Amino acid sequence: MNNTCQNKSFGVLHPGVRYRIKKEFYDYNGERYQVDEEMVFIDHNFVPYESGLSLFFRTHNRELQIMLCSLEGFQQHIVHDLDAYFKRQQ
């Protein structure tokens, strides 16, 4: 994980906050994230030269990396509308 972004929010995602998946999606690697999955946001890393965004979460006592590409035809719709996919939990 890249420490340069550690403890910084990304859009609607804030470190230490639990989120629930609101809308099913697939990441860059084809991993499926299903409605009602819950995870705690840790950090993010953006690689501009590849338009790559990594979102780091903790779930079931393990770290999870969701890889997204912000280019059209990939996961741009997710990156630009995180609120449609992640719901903050109390």
Image (spheres, rainbow, N blue to C red):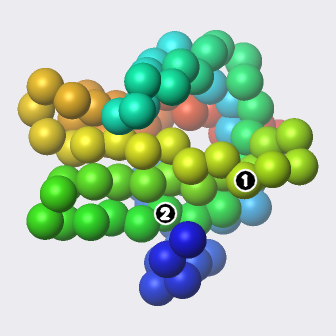
Residue drawn at (28%, 54%) of the image = 52
* Callout 1 amino acid: Glu
Specify few, some or many for label 2: CA neighbours under 10 Å numbering under 14, 14-19, or 20 or more.
Answer: many
Q: Image quarter for residue 70? A: top left
Specify few, some or many for label 1: CA neighbours under 10 Å numbering under 14, 14-19, or 20 or more.
Answer: few
How far is mark 2 from mark 1, CA to CA?
12 Å
Q: Nearer the viewer, residue 78 or 32?
A: 32
- Which residue, as the protein is rendered here, is positioned at the far bottom? 4
- The picture places residue 23, in percent across and down from the top left corner, at 52, 16
Residue drawn at (69%, 30%) of the image = 20
Where does label 1 land, which residue? 63
Q: Nearer the viewer, mark 2 or mark 1?
A: 1
* Drawn side of residue 64 relative to residue 43, left or right: right
Residue drawn at (19%, 54%) of the image = 51
- The picture places residue 42, in percent across and down from the top left corner, at 66, 62
Q: Secondary structure at mark 2?
A: strand
- The picture places residue 76, in percent across and down from the top left corner, at 22, 35
Up/down of 71 relative to 84, above or below: below
Q: How many marks?
A: 2
The quadrant of the rendering that contains the N terminus is bottom right
Residue drawn at (51%, 25%) of the image = 31
Where does label 2 land, which residue? 44
The quadrant of the rendering that contains the C terminus is top right
Earlier in the chain: of badge 2 and badge 1, it is 2
Q: Image quarter for residue 11? A: bottom left
* Drawn side of residue 50 relative to residue 61, left or right: left
**Is residue 23 visible in this depiction of the protein?**
no
* Callout 2 amino acid: His
Q: Secondary structure at mark 1?
A: strand
**Is residue 3 visible in this depiction of the protein?**
yes
